[in-house]
Amino acid sequence: MIEVLDFLIDVSLAVLSAAVTGAFFTLLIGQFAIAQKHIARHWKASRSIHAAR
């Protein structure tokens, strides 16, 4: 019985760890997408200012 409970705890911790890791990478991807939009907007504005000179 102890082995079964130990196994269930190990599985639960593995699932929890995978969920936290997935959430972390999802947040990183979201932050990268936001940063990419900001950089692209800044680069486009910078190009138009330099082209006007």
Image: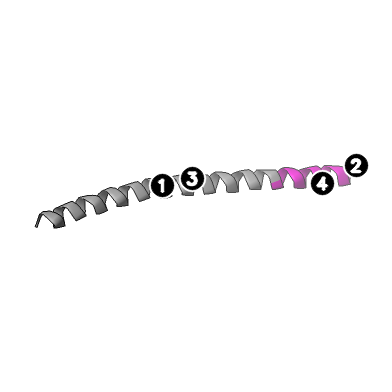
* Residue 18 percent coordinates (x, y): 64, 47
- Which of marks 3 and 2 precedes in the sequence? 2
Disc 2 element: loop
- Closest to the observer: 7 or 42? 42
Quarter in which the N terminus is drawn: top right
Looking at the rendering, the stretch of residues picked out in magenta corresponds to: 1-14
- Residue lying furthest right: 1
Checking the image for residue 1, the label placed there is: 2
What amino acid is labelled 1 in the image?
Ala
Q: Which residue is mark 4?
A: 6
- Which of marks 4 and 2 precedes in the sequence? 2
Check whether the beta carbons of the residues at disc 1 and disc 3 lie within 8 A of each other.
no
What amino acid is labelled 4 in the image?
Asp
- Which of marks 3 and 1 precedes in the sequence? 3
Q: Nearer the viewer, mark 1 or mark 3?
A: 1
Q: Which residue is mark 1?
A: 33
Checking the image for residue 43, the label placed there is: none
Q: In the shown orientation, is residue 22 left or right of residue 8?
A: left
- Closest to the observer: 3 or 24? 24
- Report the residue at 82% width, 46% height from top: 7
Check whether the beta carbons of the residues at disc 2 and disc 3 lie within 8 A of each other.
no
Disc 1 element: helix
- Which of marks 4 and 1 precedes in the sequence? 4
Checking the image for residue 27, the label placed there is: 3
- Report the residue at 24% width, 51% height from top: 44
